[in-house]
Amino acid sequence: MKIVAINGSPRAKKGMTDQVLGRFLKGAEEGGAEIETIYLAKLEINPCIACLHCWFRTPGVCRHDDDMPGLMKSLGSADLLVFACPVYVDGMTGQMKTMFDRFLSYAEPFFVFEGGRSYHPRLREDDVPVVVISTCGFPERENFQAISLHFRRIFENMHAALLAEFLFPASSLIASDPDIVEPNLCAVERAGREVAETGAVPPETVEVANLDYVGDPAAFDEKMNEVFHALRRHHGAE
Ligand SMILES: Cc1cc2nc3c(=O)[nH]c(=O)nc-3n(C[C@H](O)[C@H](O)[C@H](O)COP(=O)(O)O)c2cc1C
């Protein structure tokens, strides 16, 4: 199995999202998968300008000359895709959204009515399996509502089959209190191994990975505020 992981954090390898992604890929590698990780922050991917050249003048070819064709080649070679992205303003990062916008060149313009709704024609015969990993700063799981729904809609359009979502709120705890988050990260690692070995993630593993580790969100907020004040003092801003 070849797994291609796309990390949409501007902080790339330094970010909390990569900590979670790293555990999934560690498990997958142990399970025998071949891994390719792509950091969008390190690529040049220009925003779609809706010129529609790629639909009507030069079908399938975008006017931008950047890293998108190479990225699409990698995505096309995958048996499983992992989209790892922090929550930014209740959604995905600009880097991740810019990439999805550029998928336009790879879709035909035509509309196909199938199963009660309209799509562009399929790019692949099979429903490519996908996994989502996300982290956010606030402690409540509700902060993943919009990004989760957005990913689900995109996957429907792509004819991709969502295998599992691993959502980590209060992401600073991953660095500040690793022991608290470790059982969840262990489950993410197990999920990686399981998917590589069997092509699926058991619901029990997903459940354990997403168990609450924050406890009292108001108490978490208070602790965070102490850290914020300390940082301001450190920088002479308070
Ligand atoms: C511009 C910006 C917007 C953010 N918006 C939200 C948000 O709406 N909700 C939230 O819970 N966290 C938000 N965060 C916090 C990040 O989701 C959180 O720190 C995440 O773990 C960062 O992942 P990374 O370290 O992999 O980049 C935001 C952070 C930034 C920089």
Image (cartoon, grey):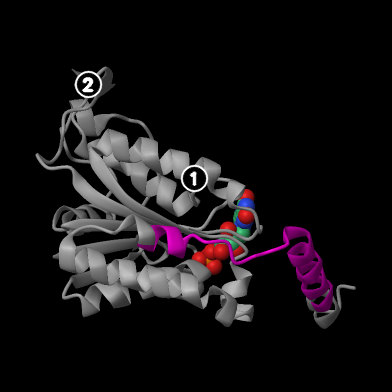
Q: Picture coordinates of residue 5 (x, y %)?
A: 30, 63
Boundaries of the magenta span: 205-230
Q: Secondary structure at mark 2?
A: loop
Residue where numbered disc 1 is placed:
147
**What secondary structure is the magenta-colored segment mainly?**
helix
Residue 26 painted magenta: no
Q: Nearer the viewer, residue 161 or 180?
A: 180
Q: Picture coordinates of residue 174 (x, y %)?
A: 56, 74
Q: Picture coordinates of residue 18 (x, y %)?
A: 44, 70
Residue where numbered disc 2 is placed:
115
What label sits on residue 53 in the rendered view? none
Q: Is residue 114 above or below residue 22?
A: above
Q: Nearer the viewer, residue 5 or 167?
A: 167
Specify which label sits upstream in the sequence, 1 or 2. Answer: 2
Q: Picture coordinates of residue 42 (x, y %)?
A: 38, 67
What amino acid type should be assigned to the residue bearing mark 2? Gly
> Taking the image as drawn, is residue 138 in sight?
yes
Of all residues, the one furthest to the front in this rendering is: 204
Q: Secondary structure at mark 1?
A: helix
- The quadrant in which the C terminus is found is bottom right
Q: Is residue 120 above or below residue 227?
A: above
Residue count near mark 2 (Cα–Cα under 10 Å), binned few <14, some 14–19, many ≥20 = few
* Identity of the residue drawn at 21% across and 52% down: 72
* Identity of the residue drawn at 49% across and 63% down: 10
Q: Is residue 48 left or right of residue 78?
A: right
Q: Is residue 70 above or below residue 153?
A: below
- Mark 1 or 2, which is nearer the eye? 2
Spatial distance from mark 1 to mark 2, Cα to Cα? Answer: 24 Å
Task: Please report contact status of discs 1 and 2: CB closer than 8 Å, yes or no.
Answer: no
What amino acid type should be assigned to the residue bearing mark 1? Ile
